[in-house]
Image: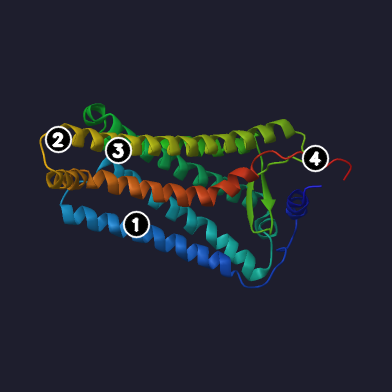
Amino acid sequence: MNNSFVSNTSCHNTPSIMGYSGKPTTSIIMFLAAVGGNLLALFILGVHQKEHHSRSSVFCILVTGLALTDLLGTCLLSPPVFICHAHNTSLISLGGDRLCNLFGFAVSFFGLAPTLILCTMALERCLAISHPYFYAVHIRRSFAKFTLFFIYLFSLAFCLLPYGGYGKFRQYCPGTWCFVDMDATGDDRANLVLAFSLSYSSLMALLIFIVFVCNGSVIVSLCQMHRNHMVRRGSVVSVARKKRLSLAWFGRGEEEMDHLVLLALITVIFVVCSLPLTSLLLPVAPPKGG
């Protein structure tokens, strides 16, 4: 029998926090780290824009949207968790199924929307480096704003599906949070519940895969551009001149490299944090015979 399955099943309707210690140290540390990190990111973006006296680029708009979305999610989801710890009560005991459903919707929304923004950032860098002419002609600041609006609208519509019967939210251990129901035990709509769980996890996995593919494409394109640049110069310049040209090339591509490094760091951190949640959503067959 799957121990995690049994543990989460026992938490579905628990009235108090399982394993309550009275000290939500981990939750507080995660909250402070998330808020501090996002505020720092917004501050750095503001300083960068002020120093260069330029309008925000498409990439900067997307990064700002990502930071604000994650910051809003952290500030909305953390207070109920702190209240649960303060009173040693589960989320369902605190506000019933209505609060659990609302919390589950918020977790799924603030999980999907940032992933979509991250994927858009990767696609934007891929177009900017691999297809510069198309990027220069078609991609404008308005594209970033429209894309953010579409991402929020799509995420809202998708995560509201459980309210229409396609999917379900359920409380999970230790009893301080609710999320998409992954097992549908004893539910008449088991097929729909499992279908939504699989749809959500598959979409998240697909987006993460696209991010890695795009980042890999950008790295390959940058390496090819540098090699081609050096080959064209190689027959007519000295070794010392080659080194200077190489440094000059990377200087001109410094902004692209900065964007790529930032995107790679965000991707790694996001994947490390989201993979356990995504794997949790994969449907698990209920144990037979108890």
Amino acid type indicated by mark 3: Cys
| Left or right: 238 in relation to 163 | left
- Count neighbours of disc 4 (C-alpha within 10 A) and say few if under 14, some if 14 to 19, many if 20 or more: few
Work out whether 133 lies above or below 279: above
| Earlier-in-chain disc, 1 versus 2 | 1
Q: Nearer the viewer, mark 4 or mark 1?
A: 1
Q: Amino acid at mark 2?
A: Arg
For label 1, the residue is 41
Q: Mark 2 near mark 4, Cβ–Cβ under 8 Å?
A: no
Asked if one can make out residue 172 in the rendered structure from this viewpoint, the answer is yes
Give the left or right position of residue 208, taking residue 141 as reference. Answer: right
* Residue type highlighted by circle 4: Gly
Mark 3 and mark 4 in contact (Cβ < 8 Å)?
A: no
- Tell me the CA gap for discs 1 and 2: 39 Å
> What is the number of the mark on residue 233?
2
Give yes or no for contact between labels 2 and 3 (Cβ–Cβ under 8 Å): no
Q: Secondary structure at mark 1?
A: helix
Viewer-nearest of discs 2 and 3:
2
Mark 4 = which residue? 186
Please report whichever mark, 1 or 3, sits nearer to the chain's N-terminal start.
1
Which is more foreground, mark 2 or mark 4?
2
Residue shown at 77% from the left, 54% from the top: 10
Q: Which residue is mark 3?
A: 223
